[in-house]
Amino acid sequence: MKQIAGIFLLCCIIFGRAAAVLGAQEAEEELSLHAQSAVLMDGDSGRVLYEKEGETVRPMASTTKIMTCILALEYGNMEDTVEASREAASQPEVHLGVRAGETYRMEDLLYALMLESYNDAAVMIAEQIGGDVKGFAALMNEKARSLGCLDTYFITPNGLDAKEEDETGRERVHSTTARDLARIMAYCVRESPKREEFLKITGTQNYYFTDLEETRSFSCYNHNALLSSMEGMLSGKTGFTGGAGYSYVGAAESEGRTYVIALLGCGWPPHKTYKWEDARELFAYGKENYALRQVLFERTFPRVLVTGGLYWEENTAGESAREEGRESQGRRIEIFGDIPGSEEGITLLLGEGEQVMRRLILPESVPAPVKEGQELGRVEYLLEGEEIFSYPLLAAENVDKMTLGTGLSYVWELFLLGEKI
């Protein structure tokens, strides 16, 4: 019977893996994308739901500016006065056309940056926050690393094609991956302490402002075409350079679900509309194939055997030693789960047929002493073999170690209390 059960389990594993591979192949066939690299991400968990060369490093053009914007919001003051330098005034189109010495309000520059993608606005912002472009690029790279975006390297705040030697002498290109770019956007719209401000700016259709001398006026129009044509659209940023081609990163909500997409190398002129076709297809794929489901947490756990402990208390209730949790080799104690957040469970975006597996990591026994609240094990929840959530299992009581000293001390306490040993 054990052999039959083993064979059955093996078949289930093989079938499950084959089904997963087949599902991935079907997804590849189902989505016919123009982009060289593409990612669809669950904006809440960071899980990649679909990718096409998602980890291939490529230039990302003006999608860079989502990082420029979020850093300015987190480190800057929106009422700051920003003066245009000669470097800012020399930036190529697309540009605001600032002149060296002109002054602008930081918040106005952020709208110019994200709606019209002005390259000179990006340099002005970078110089204000980082001291100069190089200092700001260091902040950008530091932020990318903190988000786990290890395949991203920033040189410019506006995304113009660039290369340089890093501190190790290695030649680096201004570049990212579709996975990293989606991760940065997910941070901007879901995790950043300035996410509301970011969403307000990138969700604005039209914006008007002047320089601080009020000698020049500017009108900005949002070039994220999906903002007005797709329900639930939260944010987005386009980009284009000769080296990067057309690129796009965006986020949308649907029935409580947050989807983030990233497209790199999505055609070259005259195929400017390819990115909108790919974006709609990716968002539609996510909405049709993934739904929110609740995964409930287990509330009861087996007792853990503690060996070599001091546990001589009387069984006054009359239960057997085993019912109380004592055995010849030790005593079993209660444990509990230190579940962060909701004790009910977690809500995940899952595809049809996807199952979350629970894995209990707990030793057969632990030696005394054991302190109440001491971590004795863990519970892990896995999806496709990857951990998505975990929490520790803690001891519910103290168990002192049995030594000559603790034994004599315990006997003496019983004697003083007048108890019969």
Image (cartoon, rainbow, N blue to C red):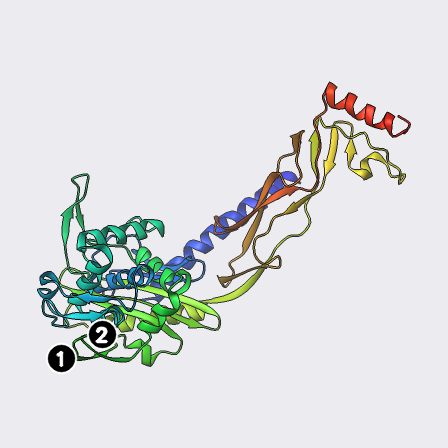
Q: Is residue 332 visible?
A: yes
Tell me: 303 left or right of 50.
right
Residue positioned most to the top: 404
Image: 410 above or below 348: above
Tell me: 158 left or right of 418.
left
Q: Amino acid at mark 2?
A: Thr
Name the residue nearer the viewer: 391 or 124: 124
Coordinates of residue 37 in the picture (x, y in percent): 27, 59
Name the residue nearer the viewer: 181 or 16: 181
Coordinates of residue 255 in the picture (x, y in percent): 48, 73
Q: Residues within 10 Å of mark 1 (few under 14, many from 20)?
A: few
Residue bearing the label numbered 2: 273
Tell me: 218 left or right of 408.
left
Q: Are marks 1 and 2 in contact (CB under 8 Å)?
A: no
Q: Say how many tags the image has.
A: 2
Q: CA distance from mark 1 to mark 2?
A: 37 Å
Q: Quadrant of the N terminus?
A: top right
Image: 269 above or below 74: below
Coordinates of residue 95 in the picture (x, y in percent): 14, 70
Tell me: 110 left or right of 232.
left
Question: Disc number at residue 76?
Answer: none
Residue bearing the label numbered 1: 215
SS of the residue under disc 1: loop
Based on the displayed image, in which of its 4 quarters is residue 217 positioned? bottom left
Coordinates of residue 176 in the picture (x, y in percent): 25, 54
- Report the residue at 77% width, 23% height from top: 409
Name the residue nearer the viewer: 319 or 77: 77
Q: Amino acid at mark 1?
A: Thr
